[in-house]
């Protein structure tokens, strides 16, 4: 069994790497609207530090519940997209 904090950290690392690859691909092909993206880019780092700080203070059971809810919501969204996508 993988500890919850390790699972969350590993998931975040994987998401970061895949997002970075997508971002670089879009940036290199001039597909980013920088005026819209800049505020997001400026808040990502402080938000990451805030999230890391909060995760140290939140009990593991609460983190596990939040992680489960996020996974369930992602599954519902993916399932809904699969049924509404055109062939």
Image (cartoon, helix red, strand yellow):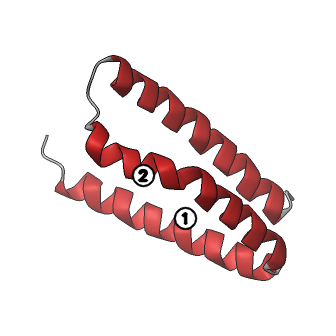
Instruction: Give the residue at mark 1.
Output: 71
Residue at figure coordinates x 77%, y 67% from the top left = 53
Relative depth, front residue between 11 and 49: 49
Instruction: Give the residue at mark 2.
Output: 40
Q: Position of residue 40 (x, y in %)?
A: 42, 52
The answer to whether 1 appears left or right of 7 in the picture is right
Q: Is residue 49 above or below residue 35?
A: below
The circle on residue 63 is none
Of the numbered discs 1 and 2, the one sitting upstream in the chain is: 2
The answer to whether 80 appears left or right of 86 in the picture is right
Quarter of the image where one finds residue 35: top left
Q: Position of residue 48 (x, y in %)?
A: 64, 57
For the image, the number of numbered tags is 2
Most extreme residue toward the top is 28
Q: Position of residue 20 (x, y in %)?
A: 52, 32
The answer to whether 2 appears left or right of 39 in the picture is right
Q: Do the CB atoms of the residues marked 1 and 2 lie less than 8 Å apart?
A: no
In the rendered image, the quadrant that contains the N terminus is bottom right
């Amino acid at each position: 069994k993988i500890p919850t904090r390790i699972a969350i950290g590993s998931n975040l690392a994987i998401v970061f790497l895949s997002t970075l690859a997508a971002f670089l691909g879009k940036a290199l092909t001039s597909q980013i609207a920088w005026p819209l993206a800049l505020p997001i880019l400026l808040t990502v780092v402080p938000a990451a530090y805030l999230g890391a700080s909060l995760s140290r203070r939140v009990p593991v059971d609460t983190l596990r519940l939040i992680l489960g809810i996020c996974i369930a919501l992602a599954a519902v969204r993916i399932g809904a997209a699969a049924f509404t996508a055109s062939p």
